[in-house]
Image (cartoon, rainbow, N blue to C red):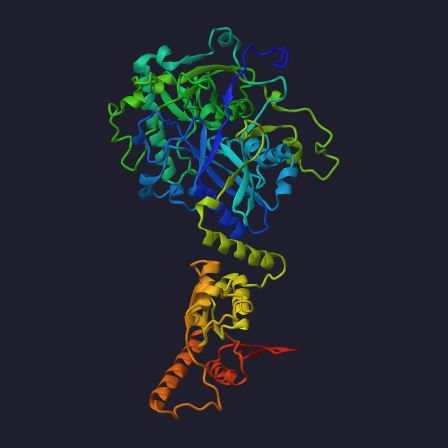
Amino acid sequence: MTSQQQQPQQLVRFLPFRSIAEPSFWLDHNAHKLNELRLSEEGVPLWGFFGVSNASSNAAASAVTPLPPAGMRFDTSSSNSNDILNSSDAAATAVRRNEWIRSSGNIYSLNTIDSLKKLNKNKFLNAACLPSLLACCGIHKHKGGESSSNNADPNIALISSTCLTYCDLKSNTTVYWFAFPALTPRSGCGIAYSSASASESTPQRRIGEVWGDQMCSSLSRSFHRFRVVQEEVNTSGCQGQVWCPPFFLLLPAYTEGGNTRKTKCLPLNKSTYDALTEEEKQSVIFGFVDPNTSPSNNSDADAVGWTLRNLVAYLSLSLGLGGHDKTFLSYRSPFLRRITVSDSLDNEDPMQESYEDVGEDYDDGDAGIGQSLLLDIKIPLASDYQWPSTKDQPSSSDSSTEADIICSSYRCVGWELNKNNKPGPRSIDLRPLVSPAHLSRQANDLNLRLMKWRALPSLDVERLSQMKVLLLGAGTLGCGVARILLGWGIRKITFVDSGRVSYSNPVRQSLFGLEDCKDGGKYKAVAAAESLVAIAGPDVQSEGVVLTIHMPGHSFGGGKDGASEVEAARKDITRLDKLIGDSDVVFLLTDTRESRWLPTVMALARETPLINAALGLDSWLVMRHGP
């Protein structure tokens, strides 16, 4: 009789992951989209992590804030492949968060909200995640032609996450939808408890009640030794980084050197399982670190972690255990102690476990690992994971590859529910986290980058932001040019003018207001510089220099204070020469023809580019001088 004919008496209830993305993660992601990804919608690496800590645990047990039950966290390290937490350097392991379990995957940033709405989410999830999951289960090879199940580490491949996003960079809001993919049997072939356990009042058994304190202590020591061994293997560079291993094989009794010991934890993979004796294969328990940390009085306490779904699929597809009744250990502990460089098997003190590890009671009634559950589950057949073909399924007659045809027979589930507990995306508004000045700068830069991506690939936005621009004249032309330069990303602007703001100026000169006209009027150069900062924010470096530009044919020094006039003129000329020499470009925007002669000569001598702009009653002129 097939599993399809045997209707399960009680299905296993799983608690899906819940994403917990810190605001800093989204700020980093938005910056990466703006500066690196641009118009690309290709996936980039994404790492998340989860643990076993809950709010009732000892807060000092971990340096990271405890997560809610089944919470998958994403922070600034989630998109940094060079983070120290991934380092295999033994000197850095003391700061690695190996008390957490890592997920890997990709994040995809779409360019429009319509793309996100119209995307077939289930088809996308299957295309993005099935190849790696099936390769780990031995169904087909990776793109590179690597052998699948023998080399793929289930501790990495079976814990994955995917995210679709749309970043509205102008409004600083992000729409996102996380998925935690899991292979699922076809309809009518769910994962169920074995017939014997399903007939009982509860198919779950607490190991504290079944095994007792001594056995729980032995399990705690064995799992700690197992983590130390895996840490030493990782730091030696023999394998990829796997923070805390999420899966393991548990031998409740084994013989070594003529002595019988109670428990032993081994890494989960095909080669380790195949090396077991037939007796060990019959007694082995498949353990997984359960992310469900719900208190025993919570309605979700009887649900098991989402990671069990892929573990069951792996046992069916890779180890060939479909149709067998197997025992699983839902390992639940108040917290996992961090493994540091000082931990080793030689220095291990077997009596050093804290009461949280072993399982003494808490004040709220919850226990340590005694709360872990034994589950007897009937593993679905390998054929139960193959879905019937559909109209849009690839066939050998078209251009589809063999991998595409194989993947089309399998399905993934795992899209996260939104705050209304329905399938759908969530959103986050980042505007309260950034200053108005930063929002203005980012919005303006976005316009420039869009022009660069779509029309002007040679536009050097960073160069523009670093240029020093000198505006000679802060009148109608000076105010207009300054605001246009702001729009082009110029952030370092110096005004030179000796005039004051009069009541006739604000209607024609956009950087001035009536307040600037009072008490004889502010100096135009100073008022214009202050106005730019008020408009664009404090990151604008704007300065106003009150200085007279001397003109040929205009005499000075002939009056009573002739000597002082000559000295003042000399200082003005020296200062103007230095300003032109320190600038990357000069805009000559004065009112008269005579006032343009001296700056033009100085710019030519300094080899500083000069843009000469003038307005007449019925004409205008723009001319470039210099290199």
Which of the two residues, 187 or 267, is positioned nearer the viewer here?
A: 187
- Compared with residue 603, is residue 7 higher up or lower down, i.e. above or below? above
Which of the two residues, 380 or 205, is positioned nearer the viewer here?
A: 205
> Would you say residue 279 is visible in this rendering?
no
- Quick check: 210 left or right of 390? left
Q: Number of labelled discs?
A: 0
Q: Quadrant of residue 574?
A: bottom left
- Quick check: 475 left or right of 526? right
Q: Quadrant of residue 101?
A: top left
Q: Residue at x 64, y 34 (%)?
A: 123
Residue 102 drawn at (x, y percent): 44, 34
Q: Residue at x 46, y 42 (%)?
A: 25
- Compared with residue 624, is residue 534 higher up or lower down, i.e. above or below? above
> Would you say residue 558 is visible in this rendering?
yes
Q: Residue furthest right?
A: 397
Residue 387 drawn at (x, y percent): 65, 24
Residue 478 drawn at (x, y percent): 52, 71
Residue 257 drawn at (x, y percent): 31, 19
Q: Quadrant of the N terminus?
A: top right
